[in-house]
Image (tube, helix red, strand yellow):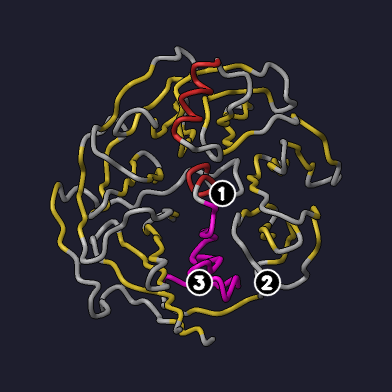
Amino acid sequence: MKTRILIAILAILLTGCQIAVSGNADMQTPIAPKTALYGNSNGNVANTAYILEVGDDIYIANQVAPSESALYRYNALDGSMEKLLEDCRGYLNLYNNRLYYLASDGIVSADLDGKDIKSVYEAAGHVGFIIYDDMLILNDQGICSIDLDSVQITDITDKRVYNINVGEDKIYCISLENVSPEVAESVERLDISDNVGAIYQMDLDGGNWELLCETIVTNLIYHEGYLYFLPLDAVGIQRLDVDTRKIDNISDTNYQNFNIINDRLVCSSASSIDILELDGALVRSITADEGFRDTAFNVTSRYVFYRRFASHKLCMLDVETGESCVIIQEDT
């Protein structure tokens, strides 16, 4: 199977990628994920972290079709694209000018040119992780951490959890551990057992495991003192203040997924991508001929990336101009 790389120069939109834009036009300042302490943002990691921005370069773990799982480097300034290595399945993180990512046999690292590949953690299955300060925090049938300087592995918890987030020296996650019989019964009725649960927090060493909210949620993202999530028993996005435990309803729109670009939400419905303020106020709504339902967003300082699995395409949306185009398409 041959992979065709379509170089994206946003001034030249590909046929079929024209879009209509409505809403406020106050989008002139680039908005970036805050990743000063992180290898990637919580929002990207919640969406398998297939995009990582490093300076002018954007690293892409191609997951458009099952025939390939390679790593590409795309330069947004000149539109150049190069394939760096095979076997990259996402969870891209950066630490000390090295890339960390999930491969078929576990977590590995490489230099920024995709060379000098080293094994970090061996695993046979899907392992999600995020780098926080000098620790790699991973979820492999329980949470453990790896000190990236000493390479020491420390077990944090053997609880079954999903969607790990890190902030303010706390780990936030969703889990069905220790929920009430009523909640467990409601989840069983929904016939969903993976990637859903109540919201918990714990210290970085696993201490002080605590239930924050018994609402069953999915798509959990921590951002500056709040946990944003999609509740299963209601429509829309809600947020939880981790200090006061107060829950606010952000939007009543039936969104399927979301991410956070700095201080704005990027949300997908059946037919549009909406940019919202963190209080839910609409900034811009972007519609297209192909819906954005069931997509996983990754973000950089200016672009939103989303995948169209049916047509084997990876698309890039400029949040300043509202223009979208295909940058990777796999021939079948």
In the image, what residue occupies the spot 64% across and 48% down?
128
Identity of the residue furthest to the top in this view: 244
Residue found 21% across the figure and 43% down from its top: 283
Q: CA distance from mark 3 to mark 1?
A: 23 Å
The percent coordinates of residue 49 (x first, y second) are: 54, 54
| Along the line of sight, the residue nearer the viewer: 130 or 173 | 173
Q: Which residue is mark 3?
A: 65
The label shown at residue 114 is 2
Is 11 or 109 nearer to us in this picture?
A: 109
Of the numbered discs 2 and 3, the one sitting upstream in the chain is: 3
* Quadrant of res 313: bottom left
- Sort mark 2 into few (<14), some (14-19) or many (20+) by Cα contacts within 10 Å: some
Task: Give neighbour class at mark 1: few <14, some 14-19, many 20+ (Cα, 10 Å).
Answer: many
**Residue at image point 39% right, 34% down:** 230
Residue 76 falls within the magenta-colored stretch: yes
Quadrant of image for the C terminus:
bottom left
Number of numbered discs on residues: 3
Front position in the image: 283 or 124: 124
Q: Which residues are magenta?
A: 48-77
Q: Which mark is residue 40?
A: 1
Relative to 59, 142 lies left or right? right
User: Residue at (50%, 65%) from the top-left corner?
Assistant: 58
What is the quadrant of residue 171 in the picture? top right
In the rendered image, which quarter contains the N terminus?
A: bottom right
* Mark 3 touches mark 1? (CB < 8 Å): no
Left or right: where 135 falls relative to 42? right
Judged from the image, the secondary structure of the residue bearing numbered disc 3 is: loop
Task: Tell me the distance, in whole angstroms, between the alpha carbons under discs 1 and 2.
Answer: 18 Å
Type of amino acid at the residue the image marks with label 2:
Gly
Please name the amino acid that badge 3 sits on. Answer: Ala
